[in-house]
């Protein structure tokens, strides 16, 4: 990875207006219920279109059973994410830590980002598991994957998982949904520690049928930012709001 000291702050990109059918979702805290469904493409026949409860909770079908689930992402960092699986009666189960579902080992940092990255009506997940080195050299991720939905409840695995290079360019500290491409495909912002005291904002832009792409130098120059542990780069905090409306 290039260790460049210039700071390149991307200008805000106008959010894409998406037409979303929001059905049966109550704007309430964890433990509330919702019912109903909307026809969707993909592997499930019935599901609720994703919507937001507040700024940090996304409600949508993550496991493909046709019942909306609740994904909470405190601080938008992707490191403290929890899931409450939805039931047929519209209720939600107890909170389950994504780090535990992913099988994070002691000392590892688990990061995740959830969105419909391919804009095909199915929620997907990007995951990264890494044990920070604690020194100047960055550690390589033990697990770094893009997991198209639907995901299995037991371990958040996907039948179509593929390796992501986000863990090959440093230690991922945060994963956030962003809108850099000015299109219908959610993108990925990565708070990355490449070593030597740097702390950069890396980006991966999504495309149809592929989800978040690979590292691209030109896109990094356009949308990324080079920082340090003393002066960290700015990170997006409204990625979900760019693509999903509040629950009605």
Image: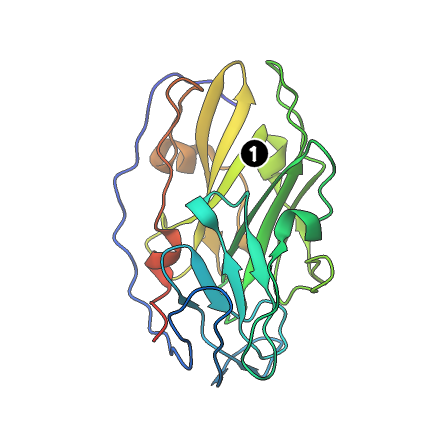
Report which quarter residue 185 is drawn in. bottom left
Q: Is residue 220 visible?
A: yes
Taking the spot 38% from the left edge, 38% from the top edge, the residue there is 235
Element type where label 1 sits in the image? strand
Towards the viewer: 208 or 60: 60
Towards the viewer: 219 or 82: 82
Vertical side of 135 occupied by 63: above or below: below
Taking the spot 58% from the left edge, 79% from the top edge, the residue there is 66
Residue 239 image point, x, y percent? 38, 52
**243 left or right, relative to 172:** left
Q: How many marks?
A: 1
Q: Which residue is mark 1?
A: 172
Taking the spot 34% from the left edge, 58% from the top edge, the residue there is 241
Q: Is residue 205 visible?
A: no
**142 left or right, relative to 7:** right
Vertical side of 205 occupied by 23: above or below: below
Q: Residues within 10 Å of mark 1 (few under 14, many from 20)?
A: many
Residue 39 image point, x, y percent? 49, 84
Quarter of the picture containing the N terminus is top right
């Amino acid at each position: 990875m290039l260790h460049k000291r210039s700071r390149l702050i991307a200008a805000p990109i106008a959010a894409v207006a998406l037409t979303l059918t929001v059905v049966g979702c109550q704007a309430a805290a964890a433990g509330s219920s919702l019912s109903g469904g909307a026809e969707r493409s993909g592997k499930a026949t019935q599901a609720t279109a994703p919507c937001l409860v507040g700024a940090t909770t996304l409600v949508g079908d993550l496991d493909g059973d046709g019942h909306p689930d609740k994904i909470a992402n405190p601080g938008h960092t992707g490191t403290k994410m929890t899931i409450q699986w939805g039931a047929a009666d519209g209720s939600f189960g107890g909170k389950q830590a994504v780090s535990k579902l992913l099988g994070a080992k002691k000392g590892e940092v688990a990061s995740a980002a959830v969105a419909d990255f391919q804009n095909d009506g199915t929620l997907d997940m990007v995951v990264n598991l890494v044990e920070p080195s604690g020194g100047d050299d960055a550690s390589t991720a033990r697990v770094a994957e893009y997991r198209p939905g639907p995901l299995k409840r037991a371990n958040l695995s996907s039948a179509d998982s593929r390796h992501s290079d986000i863990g090959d360019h440093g230690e991922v500290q945060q994963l956030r949904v962003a809108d850099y491409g000015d299109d219908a495909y959610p993108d990925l912002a990565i708070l990355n520690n490449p070593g030597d005291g740097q702390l950069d904002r890396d980006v991966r832009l999504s495309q149809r049928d592929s989800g978040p792409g690979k590292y691209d130098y030109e896109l990094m120059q356009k949308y990324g930012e080079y920082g340090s542990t003393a002066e960290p780069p700015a990170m997006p905090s409204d990625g979900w709001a760019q693509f999903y409306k509040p629950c009605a």
